[in-house]
Amino acid sequence: MRISRFRDFISEDLAFTAQAPHGVPPDDDDIKALSKKLTNLNKRFMSINYGGCGAFAVCLYDAIESEFGVTPNILLQLHNRGGDNIRFLPNYKNVVELNSDGFGLNHVVLELNGWIMDSDGVRKRSDDWDIRGSSWDIHTIGIDQLRGWVDEEAGWNDTFDRGQIEKMRKSVSRVLQHVGKLCVKRHLSVKDADTAAAAAVDKAT
């Protein structure tokens, strides 16, 4: 089975495979399928990136953990209105508190070993994403804190229709289940090919 960059995307040491439901790591073709399907969701659910990025991140986080047994990092892209005069605190209860402290929440994404994931698909993390001038900060938070933020409507861009969240959750889950099935199918096809090759060698000898 070939080693690919997608394995690094999922887990640096592949330790997750022992916990994953299928015990099979995704490959390059799987990451392409995942990216395409995530962008399709962006077309199906309106204005995800205008108030729904946090909810989407929670849905994607849960689906990845369920299907592959790994927990992504959650990254916040913040507009720092106060420069060096303010610092990010770890215990903001909601987006309103965050904003009132001098930060503006621009975007929420997931990250695994240098790969960024959101409704725009999967792409390699780059300096351009991290640094858009001195007024931008990148911070991480835990899933429970983000859930609390998403549960409260206040502070988020109200362009996004929150009535979509439950359907979005189910759709994201189906996407990850599909990717998981691709992993299993690939694994079995490679295994069958190896078995056939071994049988041919035995027959020849």
Image (tube, helix red, strand yellow):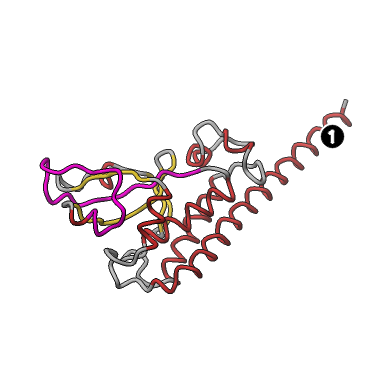
Residue found at the very far top of the displayed protein? 205
Image coords of residue 54 (percent x, y): 37, 58
Image coords of residue 190 (percent x, y): 70, 42
Queried whether the magenta region covers residue 87, the answer comes back as: yes
Residue 17's quadrant in the figure? top right
For residue 56, side relative to residue 26 (left or right)? left
Q: Using a 10 Å C-alpha cutoff, classify the residue at mark 1 as few (fewer than 14 neighbours), some (14 to 19) or many (20 or more).
A: few
**Residue interval drawn in magenta:** 71-98
Q: Is mark 1 on a helix, strand or loop?
A: helix
For residue 106, side relative to residue 148 (left or right)? left
The residue under label 1 is which amino acid type?
Answer: Ala
- Foreground residue among 61 and 29: 61
Image coords of residue 100 (percent x, y): 18, 56
Residue 69 drawn above or below residue 61: above
Q: Which residue is drawn at 36% across and 60% down?
A: 53
Residue 15 drawn above or below residue 155: above
Residue denoted by label 1: 199
Q: Which residue is drawn at 53% across and 56% down?
A: 33
For residue 178, side relative to residue 12 (left or right)? right
Residue 1's quadrant in the figure? top right
Q: Which residue is drawn at 25% across and 43% down?
A: 89
- Foreground residue among 100 and 25: 100
Task: Classify the position of the C terminus by image quarter.
Answer: top right
Queried whether the magenta region covers residue 69, the answer comes back as: no
- Foreground residue among 87 and 171: 87
